[in-house]
Image (cartoon, rainbow, N blue to C red):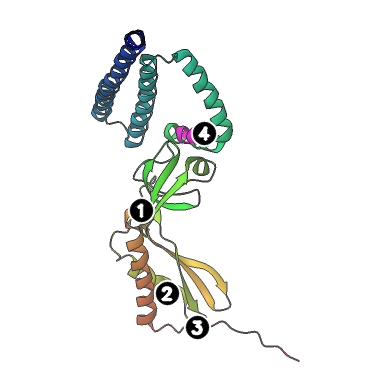
């Protein structure tokens, strides 16, 4: 029995205590490494903020640096525990190939995210329409872009779908047109309607004075003349101008006593 105790003691000294020290060293590396990673990320954030770097690019760099440092930290911990890092690197590379084949769509989203950051067709805070969704850009992530729609819905769209589709950036230019239509009857003089609408629409708040609002004949149809009414405004004021212009059209038609347009049905002679 004494020899068994001696063997157990020898095994403890040979394997147990070094393993315990390795385990404690791994915990220490995890804690200290976490502090270092946090410090490095904060330093990078302050440096980018001091240079007034774009918010989208700064967030992307911060996330990428954080992921890279954490991978290096895990490799260092595995090395402390006695796992051969060369073997781990080989396993990681093989796993990367397998994941790449299985998650090709995810990697495509990542690649598209890189191009969105480099080419910058839009940035955080812009109002866009892309990938079948429209709204204000809240975040451009590594794999997806988050939008908030006008009716306050949160929409997450894959970067590859956005990058492979047409991107409409409503915030890129200083103003945009608000396109509306006004159908008038055959008995209404289009010139009179155009004059009244121009005068009324010009009074709407937050529209651009230059260029001036456009009111013209768009087409003639069975009901009469179709007018296009197009004031211009900043994108932030789009919906206010949109609704106010609709009200202006209704006010003009009502105050002028314009009849309700009616589609003329064709008479058939037998």
Look at 44% across and 62% down and name the residue there. Answer: 179
Q: Please give the residue where the numbered disc 3 appears in the rendered image.
A: 187
Quadrant in which the C terminus is drawn:
bottom right
Span shown in magenta: 110-115
> In the image, 139: left or right of 268?
left
Q: Nearer the viewer, residue 179 or 26?
A: 26
Residue 236 at x, y = what percent?
32, 54
Neighbourhood count class around disc 2 (C-alpha, 10 Å): few under 14, some 14–19, many 20 upward: many
**Secondary structure type for disc 2:** helix
Distance from the alpha carbon under mark 4 to that under mark 1: 34 Å
Distance from the alpha carbon under mark 4 to that under mark 3: 62 Å
Residue 84 at x, y = what percent?
45, 13
Q: What is the number of the mark on residue 107?
A: 4
**Secondary structure type for disc 1:** helix
Quadrant in which the N terminus is drawn:
top left
Q: Mark 3, mark 1: which one is toward the viewer? A: 1
**Secondary structure type for disc 3:** loop
Residue furthest bottom as drawn? 270
């Amino acid at each position: 029995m004494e020899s068994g105790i001696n063997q157990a003691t020898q095994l403890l000294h040979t394997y147990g205590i070094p393993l315990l020290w390795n385990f404690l060293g791994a915990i220490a590396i995890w804690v200290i490494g976490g502090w270092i990673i946090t410090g490095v990320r904060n330093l990078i954030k302050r440096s980018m903020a001091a240079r007034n770097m774009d918010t989208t690019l700064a967030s992307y760099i911060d996330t990428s640096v954080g992921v890279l440092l954490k991978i290096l930290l895990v490799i260092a911990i595995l090395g402390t525990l006695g796992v051969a890092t060369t073997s781990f690197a080989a396993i990681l590379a093989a796993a990367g190939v397998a994941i790449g084949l299985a998650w090709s769509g995810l990697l495509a989203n990542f690649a598209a995210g890189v191009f969105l950051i480099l080419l910058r067709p839009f940035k955080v805070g812009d109002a866009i329409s892309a990938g079948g969704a429209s709204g204000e850009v809240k975040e451009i992530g590594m794999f997806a872009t988050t939008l908030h729609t006008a009716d306050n819905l949160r929409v997450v769209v894959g970067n590859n779908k956005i990058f492979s589709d047409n991107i409409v950036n409503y915030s890129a230019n200083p103003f945009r047109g608000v396109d509306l239509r006004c159908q008038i009857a055959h008995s209404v003089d289009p010139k009179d309607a155009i004059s009244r609408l121009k005068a009324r629409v010009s009074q709407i708040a937050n529209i651009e004075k230059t260029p001036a609002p456009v009111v013209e004949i768009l087409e003639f149809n069975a009901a009469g003349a179709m007018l296009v009414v197009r004031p211009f405004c900043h994108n932030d004021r789009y919906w206010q101008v949109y609704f106010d212009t609709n009200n202006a059209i209704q006010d003009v038609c009502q105050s002028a006593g314009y009849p309700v347009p009616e589609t003329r049905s064709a008479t058939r002679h037998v």
